């Protein structure tokens, strides 16, 4: 499930931000959830594009919840992925929001800053909070207040061509960007191929932007100002610029995105693909010979050891008429048992420690298919995984500014120092 489409609607925030803040702070509770004096309540639950594949799963969970909680009914509404942000913005503004909503933390944090969501610190006991991965729980907090409950996770890993690496003199794939640079040079010199493909297209993958955090450079400070005009930030600019100018990256990294990265890996022209494990099926279907020599390893990172993860969460609008029922249902959907079941059904990762320790993730035989091995690798790296990009509504604009200036440095139109300074200035003056 790509996060890229979720960013397309951030521009709406600029138009609705002030009105939304006013409506949230001034409107009385009158949303879709309802409860009465007898304690009966209806919880309206929105998910993102999970029908029809998971219709049976949710119908079974809802039935089990309603049976265990007499007096609470759940109305499930599934919203197309590309429509969710505009719909929830409209619903919150009109005070007709559902009671439990499936969002990503990046977007949810923007509305958390406008007091859209029910504060959860006092609603969820600390012992329950501690059942979730700590770094993932933190991704659902703003200024010390929890605004969302973690649900399912996805992450990328390194898919590598064992034959190409062996030809270059390596039995194991690189684990850090420093090692990756060495492998890139050896692969190019000994095979004529490339070690990997990282895109610098502003509208595509954020992997390069995340590499700043992984290599120890801060992107933004607490006030949202550029924090990368430092020696650490310049080192990241220098890293990518040197690789490109030394001919160790394909020329099309400036114009093409992840699709091209997958194509080059499938044709055997790159040795490493940074991607989600779900693409193993694509490789098997399109390039069975490459699939035969492919293995998986943890995501390549920098000196910090940090690895990126995409989080989906559940948030509860502040003006819900059924806050206790909404919290109870959100915790039910994200408990150990239900997270494990959904992870198995959807080929994702759970955000609770106990579910992640299940043998399904830990006991994978050496002879198991690549997809099963990838599941184990992905689960293992969750202890180091976190949301690497700052919660900022203009994060895609930051990506464009950084990538544009990186490209200028890579093409020799600017020095690295000038590119870094220009990027920081452009962001701060935008």
Image (cartoon, rainbow, N blue to C red):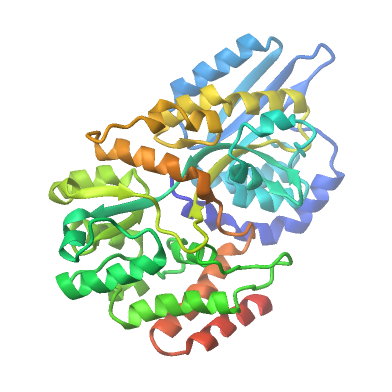
> Is residue 116 in view from this perspective?
no
Q: Is residue 161 above or below residue 26?
A: below
Q: Is residue 388 above or below residue 77?
A: below
Quadrant (top left/top right/bottom left/bottom right) for the C terminus? bottom right
Residue in the image at 33% along x and 41% along y = 374
**Image-based side of 187 in relation to 148, left or right:** left
**Image-based side of 187 in relation to 114, left or right:** left
Find residue 148 and report its horizontal and vertical position in percent.
67, 40
Find residue 190 and report its horizontal and vertical position in percent.
16, 72
Of 106 and 20, the residue lying toward us: 106
Of 266 and 169, the residue lying toward us: 169
Residue in the image at 81% along x and 17% along y = 36
**Tally of numbered discs:** 0
Of 404 and 208, the residue lying toward us: 208
Q: Farthest residue in the left direction?
A: 289
Quadrant (top left/top right/bottom left/bottom right) for the N terminus? top left
Find residue 249 and report its horizontal and vertical position in percent.
30, 73
> Is residue 92 in view from this perspective?
yes
Q: Is residue 96 above or below residue 162?
A: above
Q: Quadrant of residue 412?
A: bottom left
**Image-based side of 403 in relation to 198, left or right:** right
Residue in the image at 62% along x and 51% along y = 107
């Amino acid at each position: 499930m790509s996060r890229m489409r979720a960013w397309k609607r951030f521009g709406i925030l600029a138009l609705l931000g002030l009105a939304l803040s006013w409506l949230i702070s001034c409107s009385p509770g009158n949303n879709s959830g309802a409860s009465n004096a007898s304690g009966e309540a209806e919880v309206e639950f929105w998910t993102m594009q999970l029908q029809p594949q998971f219709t049976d799963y949710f119908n079974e969970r809802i039935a089990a919840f309603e049976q265990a909680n007499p007096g609470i009914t759940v109305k499930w509404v599934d919203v197309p992925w590309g429509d969710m942000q505009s719909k929830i913005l409209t619903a919150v503004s009109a005070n007709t929001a559902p009671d439990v909503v499936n969002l990503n933390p990046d977007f949810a944090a923007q509305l958390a800053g406008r007091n859209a969501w029910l504060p959860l610190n006092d609603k969820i006991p600390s012992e329950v909070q501690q059942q979730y991965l700590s770094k993932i729980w933190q991704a659902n907090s703003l200024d010390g207040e929890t605004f969302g409950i973690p649900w399912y996770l996805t992450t990328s890993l390194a898919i590598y061509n064992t034959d190409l690496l062996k030809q270059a003199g390596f039995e194991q794939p690189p684990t850090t960007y420093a090692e990756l640079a060495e492998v890139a040079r050896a692969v190019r010199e000994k095979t004529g191929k490339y070690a990997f493909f990282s895109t610098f297209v502003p509208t595509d993958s954020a992997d390069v932007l995340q590499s700043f955090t992984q290599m120890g450079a801060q992107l933004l400070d607490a006030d949202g100002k550029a924090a990368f005009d430092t020696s650490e930030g310049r080192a990241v600019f220098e890293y990518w610029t040197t690789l490109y100018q030394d001919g160790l990256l394909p020329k099309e990294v400036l114009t093409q995105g992840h699709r091209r990265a997958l194509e080059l890996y499938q044709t055997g022209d790159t040795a490493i693909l940074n991607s989600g494990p779900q693409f193993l099926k694509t490789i098997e279907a399109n390039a069975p010979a490459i699939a035969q020599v492919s293995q998986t390893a943890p995501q390549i990172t920098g000196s910090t050891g940090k690895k990126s993860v995409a989080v989906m969460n559940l948030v509860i609008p502040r003006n819900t008429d059924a806050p206790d029922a909404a919290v109870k249902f959100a915790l039910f959907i994200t408990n150990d048992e239900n997270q494990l079941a959904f992870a198995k059904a959807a080929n994702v990762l759970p955000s609770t420690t106990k579910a992640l320790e299940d043998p399904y993730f830990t006991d994978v035989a050496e002879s198991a298919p690549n997809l099963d091995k990838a599941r184990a690798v992905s689960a293992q790296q969750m202890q180091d995984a976190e949301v690497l990009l700052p919660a900022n509504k203009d994060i895609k604009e930051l990506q464009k500014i950084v990538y544009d200036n990186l490209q200028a440095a890579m093409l020799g139109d600017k020095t690295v120092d000038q590119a870094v300074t220009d990027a920081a200035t452009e962001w701060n003056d935008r």
